[in-house]
Image (tube, rainbow, N blue to C red):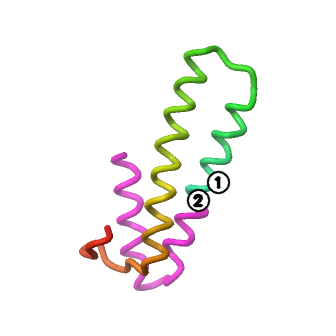
Amino acid sequence: MILFTDSTEYYIQEMEENPLSLQDHLSYTEDGLKLLVELIRNPLEPIKRKILVSLITAEVHCRDIVEKLADTGCDSVNDFSW
């Protein structure tokens, strides 16, 4: 979550120069999620499957947050929605 918070703040700050910065971040987040989904579709040991399920759950949560920030027009790290 530390990396997510750091990268999301970076993309929010980039909104001044690139108004579509959060959309870029959303695309990046979705690409990572797609990679995890591809991994879980393969046969896995039970512990590896549980780890991937946890990672996917966290990534979906992160994706939802970025999507909400983009939809609400968040453009500052001081914005209440962030």
| Circle 2 Cα neighbour tier, 10 Å, few/some/many (<14 / 14–19 / ≥20) | few
- According to the picture, the residue beneath numbered tag 2 turns out to be 28
Q: Residue at x 67, y 40 (%)?
A: 37
* Residue 19 horizontal side relative to residue 42, left or right: left
First to last magenta residue range? 1-28
Q: Which mark is residue 17?
A: none
Q: Residue at x 45, y 85 (%)?
A: 17
Element class at badge 2: helix
As measured in the structure, the alpha-carbon distance from the residue carrying label 1 to the one carrying label 2 is 5 Å
* Residue 20 horizontal side relative to residue 5, left or right: right
* Residue 54 horizontal side relative to residue 82, left or right: right
Q: Residue at x 37, y 46 (%)?
A: 1
Q: Residue at x 42, y 76 (%)?
A: 14
Give the image location of residue 59, x and y in percent: 51, 47
The three-letter code of the residue at mark 1 reads Asp
The three-letter code of the residue at mark 2 reads Tyr
Magenta portion: prevailing SS class: helix
Q: Quadrant of the C terminus?
A: bottom left
Q: Which mark is residue 31?
A: 1
Q: Residue furthest right?
A: 42
Give the image location of residue 54, x and y in percent: 49, 33
